[in-house]
Image (tube, rainbow, N blue to C red):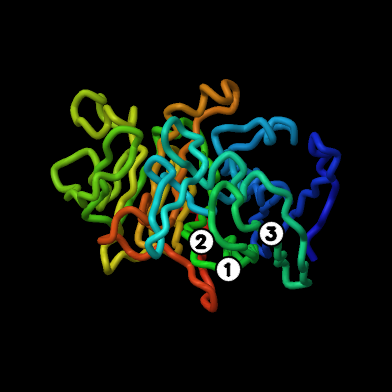
Amino acid sequence: MPAIHPFGFLADGRSVEAITLDGPQGLRAQVLTYGAILRSLSFPVEGQRRELVLSLDSLAEYERDTAYVGPLVGRFANRIAKGRFCLDGQPHQLTCNEGPNHLHGGAAGVGRHLWQVLDATSDGSVTLGLHSPAGEEGYPGNLDLRLELSMLPDALRLTITARTDAATPVNLTAHPYFNLGGDALGHWLRIPASRYLTVGAGLIPTGELAPVAGTPFDFRRGRILAPPPLHTHPQLLLGGGYDHCWVLDDDADCHCELRSPQGDIALRIAGSGPGLQFYNGQFLSRAHPGIGSGLALEPQGLPDAPNHPAFPDAILRPGRTYRAEIEYRLQLI
């Protein structure tokens, strides 16, 4: 059974719990009921337990966090231009919480709410639930979400489902910052994607799916992920580094593969959705100067999809179930 322990109290007095899941081969995860935050993911390496994700020290820090250290994000992960979209002929205005744009569900997205423990089973899984009322952050429709975390022998699997009573955009993903050991920019990264989305001001997609060949965005064969000097590519200048969405090839075997600088452990991420948002954490220290370096790798649908008819549909309608899976699989090398 997962172990459930008190983690503290929110500013409004509600209690938060930490849930620890252990796998048979030593993989261990801890998730908080606040924000469904993945606070810890660790694995034994040469007899020592190694922490693989960044975390904050206290619940108060998580409440103040603006860098999305570990939570589930949505209703719509990533960005929506000017917080606006038109759905079935009706305009909608969302909260704009990143300059003129909407990011990760707004100021009070699903990662800033207290989730409820719905179930915990003897096979090492736990299910959390959250109700997002119609109108929250400007979204239409009541949305009911479930997040199941299952511990496999060498992997943690997240299964996210949602249902609504009115059509609404949905794009949910997890936002941990990974560091498998050492400097995050020294990690080796492979992304099986021949194209990526170019962005304009505010990192909003232009709609162009550009080829990665011959650019710093080509990770198809895997390489050290540190970006070259920013002036060498206009897209790097816009993001201050990497903060872009890669569009996976049809025959992609995963969303990405990450290896530690020491070359002793590998993380393979597989999930749902055609996109992988890769952020190399270049501005993380502004929010948390002492947290260290880390990078976000987020399987998801395409950003700003409600405003791009050519992108895969991101609208959930009544009678249908949204479903997304993310699997973090660890392997010693």
- Of all residues, the one furthest to the bottom in this rendering is 319
Tag 3: residue type? Leu
Q: Nearer the viewer, mark 2 or mark 3?
A: 3
Question: Mark 1 sits on what residue?
Answer: 164
Judging from the image, what secondary structure is the residue with disc 1 in?
Answer: strand
What is the three-letter code of the residue carrying label 2? Answer: Ile
Query: Could you say which disc has been placed on residue 130 in the image?
Result: 3
Would you call the spot at circle 1 few (<14 residues within 10 Å), some (14-19), or many (20 or more)?
many
- At 77% from the left edge and 49% from the top edge, which residue is drawn? 18
Count neighbours of disc 2 (C-alpha within 10 A) and say few if under 14, some if 14 to 19, many if 20 or more. Answer: many
Numbered circle sitting on residue 115 = none
| Real-space CA distance between mark 2 and mark 3, rounded to the nearest whole angstrom | 19 Å
The CA span between labels 1 and 3 is: 12 Å
Which comes before the other along the chain, label 1 or label 2?
Answer: 1
Instruction: Identify the residue under disc 2.
Output: 326
Asked whether the viewer can see residue 226, the reply is no
Q: Residue at x 45, y 57 (%)?
A: 269
Tell me which numbered mark, 1 or 3, is placed earlier along the sequence.
Answer: 3
Mark 1 vs mark 3: in front:
1
> What residue is drawn where x is 49% and y is 62%?
168
Circle 2 sits in a helix, a strand or a loop, which is it? strand
Res 24 quadrant in image? bottom right
Question: Count the marks: how many?
Answer: 3
When the figure is inspected, residue 126 is found, relative to residue 202, above or below; the finding is below
**Image coords of residue 270 (percent x, y):** 44, 62
Task: Tell me which amino acid carries mark 1.
Answer: Thr
Answer left or right for 121 relative to 305: right
Which is nearer the eye, 31 or 147? 147
Q: Which of 290 and 311 lies nearest the eye of the viewer?
A: 311
- Please state which of the two labelled residues, at mark 1 or mark 2, is closer to the viewer: 1
Q: Position of residue 229 (x, y in %)?
A: 25, 24
Q: Is residue 207 above or below residue 228?
A: below
